[in-house]
Image: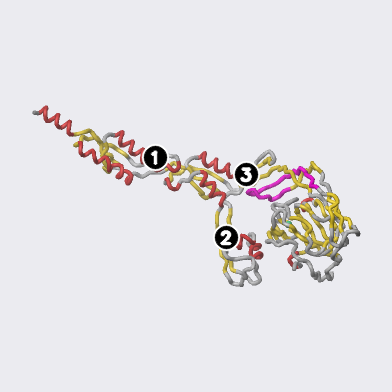
Amino acid sequence: MVIGSATVYLSSTASAAYLVVNGQKTGIVGSVEIGQHLVDEILAKRGQAINKAAKTNDHIEYQLVRVKKAELLGEMSTKIELEKKLTSYIDGYALDIAGTQIAILPNQEDIQKVLKTYQEFYTNPSDNNKLTSVEFSESTSTKPVEAQPDQVKLPDQVLKELKDGKITTTEYTVQANDSWWLIARKNDMKTKEVLASNPGMTEDSKLQAGQKIKLVSVTPYLTVMSKGILTSTEIIAFDVVTNTDTKLARGESVVKEQGSDGEKLVTYSYLQKNGKDITKQVINEKVIKSPVSQVVDKGPSSTPVSVAYSISRGSGSTSGIVWPLRGSINSYYGSRHGSFHTGIDIGGDVGDPYTAAASGTIVAAGWGGGYGNMILIDHGNGVMTRYAHSSRLLVSVGQSVSRGQTIGLVGTTGNSTGPHLHFEVILNGDTVNPLSYLH
Ligand SMILES: [Zn+2]
């Protein structure tokens, strides 16, 4: 009987273990191995999104027992209980920029990868673009941290956030005589950025003193300063030579010889801030193919050449200068980044035609160093206008042009960071603010 009852006991019970978390019974498992497996499974799942298992500081113990087999059915609910009780963390690494924690990543190598990819995004090294130095303006550092799984981000996500930059919205109170471009200028923004901050507004929207508008600006968390040598193949626009042919009718013109563009290899040394040129200087130019001038025969001029100004020296009053190109003003006349900007920059796309601001005679049309492909028109009475960074010049020296006549195409040649027309008004040899004379 004794032996029999022991047999009954052994066959109706099973060995098991109570899982004890921080001194609290949290459920029953069939064995210590099953318990440990359950804990590992929960920790792995919590770190699944970042490919790194979570860890726990909880104290986990097992109490070995024998229980009735039916009690082992309780193992099903042990996992649910454990998921509620078990606390966990990820052994991550924080990325600090200029002393501020920006993100936590799973591994230290991830941070190095993010910083390197960010640098490459803005420096874009290649056979034609040799970097001589690259560094961050801000200090960067990493340190190990214990973080909650949802605080840890993957490298791609952090990279995107770094590229997007920090978005700040400020309120601006419109002053008397403010205009959209003046507000942009005061806040070191572009007109289109100010307009984009205020949906529904256009350059023609009226502003009233006291009115509040929004300024949304984006500042980078991290700045890449890079120096390098860039070599690029550039087009040398052909000149147009015009001959007057009295046998042709007024206004008629015939292309006698088709011109063709030349090509040159230009080497620049540059300093860039997050991929944008701060300085860019030509250090070498090599003509690969010379341009061939286009020869045009023209009938007698259909519009009489006239100087439509009444400039009185001293007062500087002029009339008749009109906008050479319609576009937003990207940069104004005056001091800019420690130097003096001698004209205004009007935004446009490469190939956009621009026109003579007034009638006059072309006194220069060709390469003008930092001005790139440049046109200078003498309007008489001491007034001249200059048009720089063109992709193509459509006039040649000595030619008479009328107000509104297309003279060139917008480009980004010379010392230019993007397609635009640099426009100058020169009065008695000195540049003046074009905005004071434009109509
Ligand atoms: Zn300019």
Assess whether residue 36 is covered by the magenta stretch: no
Q: Earlier in the sequence, mark 3 or mark 1?
A: 1
Dot 2 beta carbon under 8 Å from ligand 1: no
Q: Which mark is residue 216?
A: 2
The amino acid at mark 3 is Glu
Residue 225 in percent (x, y) is at 64, 47
Residue 117 in percent (x, y) is at 58, 42
Q: Residues within 10 Å of mark 3 (few under 14, many from 20)?
A: few
Q: Residues within 10 Å of mark 2 (few under 14, many from 20)?
A: some
Q: Please, what secondary structure does the residue beneath circle 3 have?
A: strand
Q: Residue at x 74, y 51 (%)?
A: 413
Residue 192 in percent (x, y) is at 63, 60
Q: In whole angstroms, how far apart are the C-alphas of marks 2 and 3?
A: 28 Å
- Say left or right for 50 vs 359: left
Q: Please, what secondary structure does the residue beneath circle 1 have?
A: helix
Which residue position holds label 1?
44
Occupied quadrant, residue 167: bottom right
